[in-house]
Image (cartoon, grey):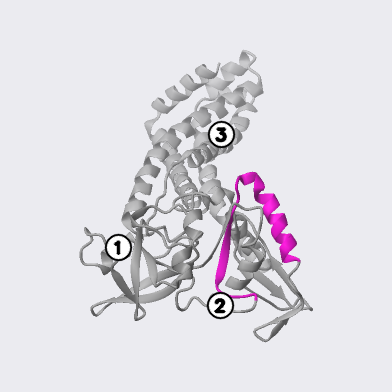
Amino acid sequence: MFANYIKIAWKVLLRHPFYTFITLFGISLTLTVLMVLTSFLDHIFGSHYPETNRDRSVYIMSMVQRDSAQTGQSSGPMSFKFLTEYVKSLKTPERVTICTFVNSSNAYVGSQKIKLNTKFTDADFWRIMDFEFLEGKPYNEQNIANGEYVVVINDELKKNYFESTGESVIGKTIDIENINYKVIGVVKGSPATRPFSYADVYFPYTAPKSNYQQNGLRGGFVSIVLAKQKSDIPAIQEEFQERARRIPVPGVENGWKYSTIEIKAEPYAENFIGTIMDGGPGLKTAFFGILFFVLFMLLGLPAINLVNVNVSRIMERGSEIGIRKAFGAPIRTLVWQFIIENIFITFIGGAIALLLTGVIIQFINSSGWIAYADLTINLSVFLISLLVCLIFGFLSGVLPALRMSKLTIAEALKS
């Protein structure tokens, strides 16, 4: 029976090329946009180079301090001292790194200024991140303990700063903010959409302007905690919260008195979404409003338009439906026939969309719009796209099928 429905659907597609073109164009365009969007979200939240361990990591990004009346709050990164005392000493994780988000500096090649994105890290940063070293090696605990002025740069800065990109630059110096640093490593760069790993230059945290000796709870550092295995994450979170409860309150930070502290260790996506959820009712309303609008525009409107096309296409088959009803075909059988036909057509549009998505992703990766972009159609993207095809095919097929199947025999034969 299923095979017969597919054969009928194929014959219907060949019967009216114009309707077929309109239908497949609408389906493929919609699914292409959804596949590209899914690939982009996977690019942002998935475990990809160099953050390949993201699926078994928790991130400590921000500390929230509130006053006793709960009317005022201050939030942001933490001090190196605080993270060393309360996070670096955790027993459950495999490893803990302390680093900054992206900062900015300048370098000069002659009279040309190069704007740099910089990051201060400890040695464990290179053990948690899975960078590909094109030259040299990362700095280690000994380099940091000696206070050496060493840096790791990415391949793009090597190309822009040094005249000969074919030669090794290990051991050469780079002048950043009038300080000479020795290059000890060159890595393949990280996409700008991954703020924990992205930078042009990586300094040891003891380098000038890191403010790692700053006292107090707040500062410019964040932490990534790597679990031995994914199942250890709840235990790490519990151990950290037990440590966090020892933070003395109330206290004073930069002249402002706080009475409570909130700090979380969460997986990357949860931390990102949690920032929005904790941003107050206005931010949450705006976020969900935009999300609903995007989903409606990408899925709802095309589905409505496709319903209208399907109604017109199915109405032409009124005599077929009337005859089948006259011979006792139940409503459920007719409904499932049209739904399966529509899902089959949707999958054809999905195959076209998959090809278009591959072309668009390749264009985005090579365009330079996102530095080091590496959008892909991996298994997760493919399975999500497959699910979307099923939902889209079902939504756009069930209403026309129900409408036609409920027609009386006389009405069907007249249509």
Asked if the residue under mark 1 is in contact with the one under mark 2, i.e. CB atoms within 8 Å, the reply is no
Q: Quadrant of the N terminus?
A: top right
First of labels 3, 2 by sequence position: 2
Q: Look at the image and give the residue range highlighted in magenta.
A: 217-245
Q: CA separation, marks 2 and 1?
A: 29 Å
Dot 1 surroundings within 10 Å: few (below 14), some, or many (20 or more)?
some
**Residue 256's image quarter?**
bottom right
Residue located farthest toward the bottom when viewing the structure as drawn: 255
Q: Quadrant of the C terminus?
A: top right
First of labels 1, 3 by sequence position: 1
Query: Along the horizontal axis of the image, is 358 left or right of 243?
Result: left
Q: Residue at x 52, y 78 (%)?
A: 211
For disc 1, the marked residue is 170
Which element type, helix, strand or loop, lies under badge 2?
A: loop
* Residue 71 visible in the picture: yes
Which element type, helix, strand or loop, lies under badge 3?
A: helix
Amino acid at circle 2 = Gln
Task: Decide: is 411 above or below 33.
Answer: above
Task: Decide: is 72 above or below 240.
Answer: below
Which element type, helix, strand or loop, lies under badge 1?
A: loop
**Residue 229's image quarter?**
top right
Q: CA separation, marks 3 and 2?
A: 64 Å
* Residue mark closest to the camera, 3 vs 2: 2
* Residue 415 visible in the picture: no
Amino acid at circle 1 = Ile
Residue located farthest toward the right when viewing the structure as drawn: 69
Amino acid at circle 3 = Gly
Q: Label for residue 213?
A: 2
For disc 3, the marked residue is 397
Question: Residue 24: x, y in percent?
Answer: 42, 37
Dot 2 surroundings within 10 Å: few (below 14), some, or many (20 or more)?
few
